[in-house]
């Protein structure tokens, strides 16, 4: 049986690559709760009003860790999650950006948009068997080079820059004006852990779910032994 500690699920996303005809979409989610482990946020619409401009600023910030200018942030949601892991409020709390928020890195040097650098959340719990709510991650649309030698490994300094970028996201979400605590939550038995750090590896991740809109065009060559 799924059992969560009641909390708020924050999700945000938009268009993955506006520079192509077959646009894909992207989405990331982070769970938060009120300070003191008190459950979901009191006023989700007020939190959206507080957080929307901060997350837009985070998304559109320039180097050293910046999103490609073909990726767009178009919406932000914050909705309460009950003990059964589903929305506990029939109203969807949503902020639509009137103008898409675009990344700043110009197209040259980008890598395929199904690749990204994952941002991993650390907690005070050790990662081991039968330990829950120990870590989490998101897959932002940061399909931006450079790669090392055109391989799957990032260039020097890229992972460190994105670790700071992840820290900046958590800071934008949990400011003192409308505080919340970013967490990792498990549906095992209500376990949760506050996020205590960000870790980023230097190998690109593949997100196959971001390859659903493309209609493949085939080339064919006839063959015969006659």
Image (tube, helix red, strand yellow):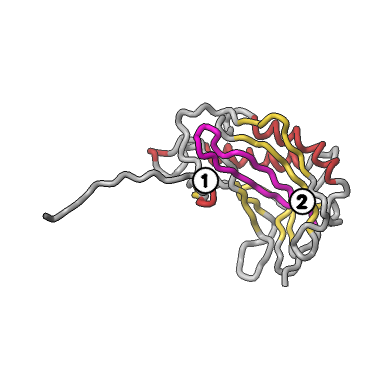
Residue 77, position as x, y percentages in the image:
74, 45
The quarter of the displayed image where residue 25 is located:
top right
Of callouts 2 and 1, the N-terminal one: 2
In reply to whether residue 25 is colored magenta, the answer given is yes
Indicate the quadrant containing the C terminus: top left, top right, bottom left or bottom right: bottom left
Residue 175 or residue 205, whichever sits in front: 205
User: Where is residue 174 shown, x and y percent of the image?
Assistant: 78, 42
Q: The N terminus lies in which quarter of the figure?
A: bottom right
Q: Secondary structure at mark 1?
A: loop
The residue closer to the viewer here, 90 or 4, is: 90
Task: Locate residue 98: give its quadrant.
Answer: top right
Q: Residues within 10 Å of mark 1 (few under 14, many from 20)?
A: few
On residue 121, the disc is none
Magenta region, main secondary structure = strand
Q: Position of residue 125 (x, y in %)?
A: 68, 60
Tell me which segment is drawn in magenta: 7-31
- Taking 9 as reference, is 189 above or below it? below
Residue under label 2: 32
Q: Measuring 57% from the left and 41% from the top, which residue is drawn there?
A: 141
Instruction: Name the residue located 75 percent from the left edge and 41 percent from the top edge.
Output: 173
Image coordinates of residue 149 in percent, x first then y, are 38, 38
Q: Quadrant of residue 72?
A: top right
* SS category of the residue bearing label 2: strand
Is 159 magenta? The answer is no
Label 2 – label 1 distance at C-alpha: 31 Å
Q: Are marks 2 and 1 in contact (CB under 8 Å)?
A: no
| Residue with the most extreme front position | 226
Look at mark 1 in the image and give the residue it sits on.
213
Q: Toward the viewer: 127 or 139?
A: 139
The correct choice, above or below, for 158 with respect to 203 in the image is: above
């Amino acid at each position: 049986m799924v059992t969560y500690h009641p909390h708020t699920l924050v999700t945000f996303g938009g268009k993955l690559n506006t520079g192509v005809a077959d646009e894909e979409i992207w989405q990331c989610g982070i769970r938060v709760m009120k300070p003191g482990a008190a459950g979901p946020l009191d006023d989700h619409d007020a939190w959206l009003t507080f957080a929307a401009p901060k997350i837009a600023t985070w998304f559109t910030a320039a180097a050293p860790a910046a999103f490609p200018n073909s990726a767009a942030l178009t919406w932000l949601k914050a909705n309460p999650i009950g003990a059964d892991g589903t929305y506990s409020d029939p109203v969807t709390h949503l902020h639509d950006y009137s103008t898409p928020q675009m990344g700043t890195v110009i197209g040259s040097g980008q890598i395929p948009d199904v690749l990204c650098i994952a941002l991993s959340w650390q907690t005070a719990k050790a990662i081991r068997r039968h330990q829950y709510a120990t870590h989490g991650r998101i897959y932002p649309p940061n399909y931006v080079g450079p790669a090392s030698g055109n391989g799957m490994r990032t260039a020097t300094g890229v992972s460190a820059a994105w670790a700071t970028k992840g820290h900046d996201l958590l800071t934008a979400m949990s400011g003192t004006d409308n505080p919340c605590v970013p967490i990792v939550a498990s549906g095992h038995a209500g376990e949760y852990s506050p996020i205590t750090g960000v870790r980023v590896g230097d190998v690109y991740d593949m997100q196959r779910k971001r390859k659903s809109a493309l209609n493949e065009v085939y080339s064919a060559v006839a063959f015969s032994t006659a």
